[in-house]
């Protein structure tokens, strides 16, 4: 949420720098993500008076203005439609740098000299209005610096509001926090109105068919308004808050929403059939067009605002095209209501509509502030659009709010927080937040939170408020009294920590992706209908369609992360994730949860340098990472076999990972068609997945120290020609099997195809390390064993020794 510092100062005195204020708010739980200066780069913009205006001789739409700068006159060529003689306007002389980065220069425009530039509001970064030159107050002196005579300089605090604090999603809410943090007094909004003689009950009435979905609905009216652009001060504040200005009536509803957190809606009274409001559920299959021009199919879960014959708004979310304020509107009915948060949240998700109003209604607003916001809106509409405020308001409130009563123990609070605060201090903190506090006895107080503090329901919530105002940085760090457990850490947790450490050491970066994925993710991976990847757990109340099922693989999250990085120009990536997948089972009520480690690499392995050429990552980079990972875990005897792999792996560039004759995972290239499904046709990615449960079952209970070799090794090479279908792992397994304990290591160090070798064959060269733990090996014994191994390779693979 974006909040103007000058707007905040209307309701609380702030005498500390904006940077310090942002720090204090952040430390109290309202994180200020950014602090943006507004109107603070206009020191070189001066007040100028238009002395004369004449048409440009060489252009029909241009004018030549003679400008009084206080110390002289200069000509300026301008095309603004609102130029008038005698007007005071902002002007930038040559050399001035505007907020957008433009540098003003003296120029010749169609043969006429132009010294400087007359500025519109958007060119100064004040609003988004570019309909004409900004007109300044007439009493300003030419030559004065605009920021010194017009209060334009401001700071915008971009605050991250947590879901449990909807009370802070408005200027008044943030001002209340500042007042409590700084010890200042909070000033409330003005709501004084002058009403006419006509009673509202004679013009309209409201029927609540569904009081559960709408516990309170209020309405007020104003007749004879004149629609026009809002004044600069309102457009300036709306723009600073990220809201587009529309007209003075609609702008007031948005302004009050930002100011006090109460969403409002303005209806054209004359377009309401039977001039009345009915709050009820939609009909199944009903079609409704919202203000954004979109048509929606409704059902009984959607709460609607209707007139005497039809729906006119989706309650708490968005109004309809059939009752919007338009250029001919003169009579306005203003809605101010409280809607059930669950009802609005379900409706918003079902329709795929999220608005400023629904954001607040979903989290809970101040049910007692409905009338205050309504009167504030009527007052501002009357000030900006004229008209007559109809006497009285309609207020359907069948079940008035009853505040919760919470007992709070002072000693319990101090024990929990690790503080030694007095009862008076705690009472002072809570009172500063406008909570009603009664002292019951020396160690007990009774608190009634106001209705806008929907997050305070228990004693522990009050303790959190005390901690926030005391300051987390002022609470001493203490160690809790916890008796050590007799049980050791879970093997899975220990393995996870170890594997993360190894992966980071291998140059990978850990990511954490959502467990919720789109339902078409498995299809994107090429999985068939009977694939386990399609065994989704469907969410009953998903955040969105793209997060409506639980993941059955880590690969979609890895690919989405790669895609996001590629879109931002980053292609050289080594990422991994440790997480659970969820497999639906028809036989079990709960899904099967399985933990996996997944990793992905793309882009360059080596950047180009003076001593090397650049190199793209390949299958062997990731296979080597898997080997390094398993070796670092103390495992051996693992093999890579080309066999059945999941559909998203390239069949020619992938393999299963075997440990003790069991498949523990897969490694390989992602299929090009899968990359195309993720809009990454030009990207080549390699991925591996390891099943942690299967891996754990084969982990050794302990690592034993292997003594250093006492006796020398003997090395022999075997250079073979075999069929292309014979895997090197198959030959390696024969060597180890036949050599037994005397084989210390087997290394494939050369591979060759083509040339004089038949296309159906390939050449492999292995270096075999022989070593005995009992003594020095006899040369003839090794030669006999080596010959036996070669013969076995010939028999089992059909290969032959390579000549030359």
Image: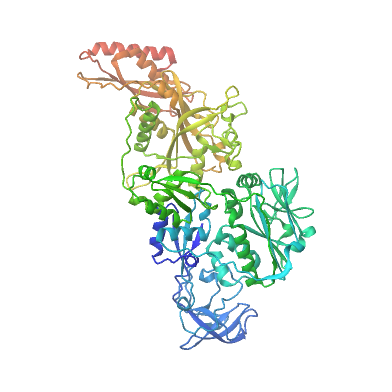
Q: In the depicted view, which residue is nearer to us: 794 or 616?
A: 616
Picture layout, residue 44 above or below residue 646: below
- Position of 214 with respect to 365 (left or right) is right
Give the percent coordinates (x, y) of residue 799.
Answer: 42, 17
Give the percent coordinates (x, y) of residue 605.
Answer: 40, 41
Q: Quarter holding the C terminus?
A: top left
- Position of 709 with respect to 168 (left or right) is left
Q: Residue at x 55, y 65 (%)?
A: 189
Picture mark count: 0
Q: Is residue 757 visible?
A: no
Q: Is residue 776 visible?
A: yes
Picture layout, residue 676 above or below residue 15: above
Residue 221, by quadrant, is bottom right
Give the percent coordinates (x, y) of residue 272.
Answer: 76, 59
Q: In the depicted view, which residue is nearer to us: 383 or 241?
A: 383
Picture layout, residue 145 above or below residue 375: below
Q: Residue at x 39, y 12 (%)?
A: 792
Q: In the depicted view, which residue is nearer to us: 723 or 745?
A: 745
Q: Residue at x 41, y 21 (%)?
A: 697
Q: Residue at x 62, y 51 (%)?
A: 400
Spot the residue most to the front.
Answer: 441
């Amino acid at each position: 949420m974006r909040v103007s510092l000058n707007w905040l100062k209307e309701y609380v005195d702030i005498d500390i720098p904006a940077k310090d204020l942002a720090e204090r708010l952040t430390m109290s739980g309202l994180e200020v993500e950014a602090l943006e200066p507004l109107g603070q780069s206009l020191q070189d913009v001066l007040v100028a008076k238009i002395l004369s205006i004449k048409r440009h001789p060489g252009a029909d739409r241009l004018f030549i203005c003679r400008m009084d700068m206080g110390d002289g006159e200069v000509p300026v060529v301008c095309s603004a439609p609102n130029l008038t003689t005698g007007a005071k306007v902002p002007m930038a002389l040559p050399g001035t740098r505007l907020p957008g980065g433009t540098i003003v220069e003296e120029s010749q425009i169609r043969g006429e000299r132009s010294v400087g530039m007359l500025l519109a509001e958007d060119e100064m970064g004040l609003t988004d209005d570019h309909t004409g030159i900004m007109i300044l107050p007439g009493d300003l002196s030419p030559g004065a610096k605009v920021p010194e005579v017009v209060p334009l300089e401001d700071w915008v605090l971009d605050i991250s509001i947590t879901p449990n604090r909807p009370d802070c999603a408005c200027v008044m809410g943030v001002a209340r926090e500042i007042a409590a943090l700084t010890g200042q007094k909070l000033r409330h909004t003005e709501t004084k109105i002058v009403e006419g003689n006509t009673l509202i009950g004679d013009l309209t009435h409201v029927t609540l068919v569904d009081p559960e979905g709408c516990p309170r609905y209020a309405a007020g009216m104003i007749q004879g308004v004149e629609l026009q652009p809002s004044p600069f001060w309102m457009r300036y504040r709306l723009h600073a808050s990220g809201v587009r200005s529309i007209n003075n009536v609609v702008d007031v509803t948005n302004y009050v929403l930002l100011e006090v957190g109460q969403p409002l809606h303005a209806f054209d009274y004359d377009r309401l059939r039977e001039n009345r409001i009915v709050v009820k559920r939609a009909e199944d299959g009903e079609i409704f067009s919202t203000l954004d021009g979109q048509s929606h199919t409704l059902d009984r879960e959607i709460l609607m605002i209707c007139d005497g014959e039809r729906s006119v708004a989706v309650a708490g979310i968005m109004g309809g095209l059939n009752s919007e304020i338009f250029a001919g509107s003169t009579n306005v009915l203003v809605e101010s209501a409280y809607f059930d948060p669950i009802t609005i949240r379900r409706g918003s998700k079902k329709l795929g509509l999220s608005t400023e109003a629904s954001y607040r209604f979903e989290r809970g607003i101040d049910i007692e502030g409905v009338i205050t916001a309504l009167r504030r809106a009527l007052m501002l509409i009357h000030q900006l659009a004229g008209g007559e405020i109809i006497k009285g308001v309609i207020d359907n409130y069948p079940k008035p709010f009853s505040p919760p009563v919470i007992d709070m123990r002072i000693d319990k609070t101090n024990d929990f927080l690790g503080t030694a605060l007095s009862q008076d201090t705690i009472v002072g903190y809570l009172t500063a937040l406008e909570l009603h506090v009664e002292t019951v006895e020396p160690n007990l107080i009774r608190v009634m939170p106001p209705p806008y503090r929907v997050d305070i329901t228990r004693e522990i919530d009050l303790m959190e408020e005390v901690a926030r105002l005391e300051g987390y940085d002022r609470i001493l760090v203490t160690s809790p009294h916890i008796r050590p457990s007799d049980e050791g850490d879970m093997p899975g947790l220990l393995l996870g920590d170890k594997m993360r450490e190894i992966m980071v050491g291998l140059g990978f970066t850990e990511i954490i992706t959502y467990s919720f994925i789109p339902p078409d993710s498995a299809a994107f991976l090429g999985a068939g209908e009977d694939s386990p990847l399609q065994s989704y757990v469907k969410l009953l109340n998903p955040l969105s369609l793209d997060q409506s099922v639980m993941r059955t693989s880590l690969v979609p999250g890895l690919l989405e992360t790669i895609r996001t990085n590629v879109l931002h120009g980053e292609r050289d990536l080594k990422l991994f994730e440790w997480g659970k997948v969820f497999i639906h089972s028809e036989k079990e009520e709960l899904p099967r949860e399985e933990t996996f480690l997944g990793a992905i690499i793309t882009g360059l392995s080596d950047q180009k340098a003076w001593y090397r050429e650049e190199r793209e990552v390949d299958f062997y980079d990731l296979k080597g990472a898997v080997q390094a990972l398993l070796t670092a875990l103390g495992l051996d005897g693992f093999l890579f076999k080309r066999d059945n792999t999941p559909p998203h792996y390239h069949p020619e560039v992938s393999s299963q990972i075997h440990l003790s004759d069991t498949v523990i995972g897969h490694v390989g290239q992602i299929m090009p068609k899968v990359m195309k499904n993720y809009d990454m046709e030009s990207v080549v990615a390699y991925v591996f997945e390891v099943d942690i449960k299967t891996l754990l079952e084969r982990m050794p209970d302990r690592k034993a120290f292997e003594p250093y070799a006492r006796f020398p090794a003997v090395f022999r090479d075997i250079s073979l020609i075999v069929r292309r279908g014979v895997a090197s792992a198959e030959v390696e397994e024969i060597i180890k099997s036949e050599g037994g304990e005397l084989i210390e290591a087997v290394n494939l160090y050369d591979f060759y195809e083509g040339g004089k070798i038949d296309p159906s064959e390939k050449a492999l060269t292995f270096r075999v390390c022989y070593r005995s733990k009992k003594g020095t090996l006899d040369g003839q014994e090794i030669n006999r064993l080596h010959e036996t191994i070669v013969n076995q390779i010939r028999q089992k693979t059909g290969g032959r020794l390579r000549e030359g």
